Image: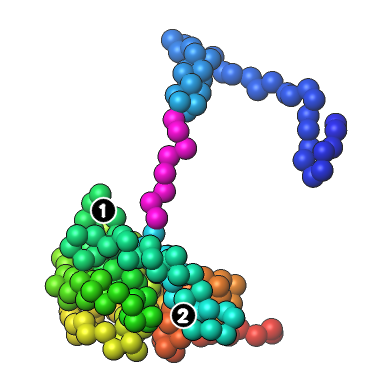
Amino acid sequence: MMYSGSAVLYPNPIPIPIPRVPGIDLWKTINEVTATLGAINDGEITISAYDTAWVALIEKQDGGSGPQFPSCVRWIVDNQLHDGSWGDAAMFSAHDRMINTLACVVALKLWGVHLEKYERGLSFLRENMWRLAEEEAELMTIGFEIAFPSLIEMAKNLGLDIPYDDPALKDIYARRSLKLKRYHFSLLLMYSIIIKGLIAPSTYSEVSFKVVGPK
């Protein structure tokens, strides 16, 4: 056995026995699958407007004013869709478009830039909030009921004029409250980085903390 750094190298690999299956040439199948996978390119990952908007919210760390990453604000400006929203251009999902659009609108409002883009995004939010209640729950993106209300609270603080009393929002807040009640205090501490990225400070009061001390 030889060592190279922390990796363990085996000069004489142990052969893995291939079981015999009547009527099937497993080696041929393995080679065909290997050739197919080898012909596939690396694929692609679509850029997340939601994540980009969160990075765009970061203020300069040198004491100056403005975004720490202005290229993220530029990406938001350059990638607004024709209907005023942000999100997956290949397909329309209300949950996807609404959370991406709200995040981008919040970022533009925070820095007070590109008001035309901001207004178009705001109009999209007003006109399509109801779609959240109409769309199937299975299409709701992971963590939507936590992340979207967090953005809504930020929008309120920034004075965005959107329908905060829409029935669709009330349902989402109810889902959020139900999910937060399931969190245990220890889990919040264990995954504090993730939780802080999803929940606005004002929502911590809705978490039912149950601290279990040593017996």
The residue at which mark 2 appears reads as: 66
**Quarter-wise, where is residue 47 in the image?**
bottom left
Question: Looking at the image, which is closer to me, 36 or 145?
Answer: 36
Q: Which residues are magenta?
A: 40-47
Q: Secondary structure at mark 1?
A: loop
Residue 109, given in percent of the width and then of the height, sits at: 33, 80
| Marker disc for residue 24 | none
Point out the tag, 2 or 1, that comes first from the N-terminus: 2
Let me know if residue 70 is in the magenta part.
Answer: no
For the residue carrying disc 1, how many other residues have a C-alpha within 10 Å: few (<14), some (14-19), or many (20+)? few
Q: Main secondary structure of the magenta part?
A: loop
Residue visible at 37% across and 82% down in the picture: 110
Location of the C terminus (image quadrant): bottom right
Who is closer to the viewer here, 142 or 46? 46
Confirm whether the magenta stretch covers residue 46.
yes
Residue at 38 percent of width and 62 percent of height: 75
Residue at the extreme right of the image, as rendered: 2
Quarter of the rendering containing residue 200: bottom left
Q: Which residue is mark 1?
A: 89
> Three-letter amino acid code at disc 2?
Gly
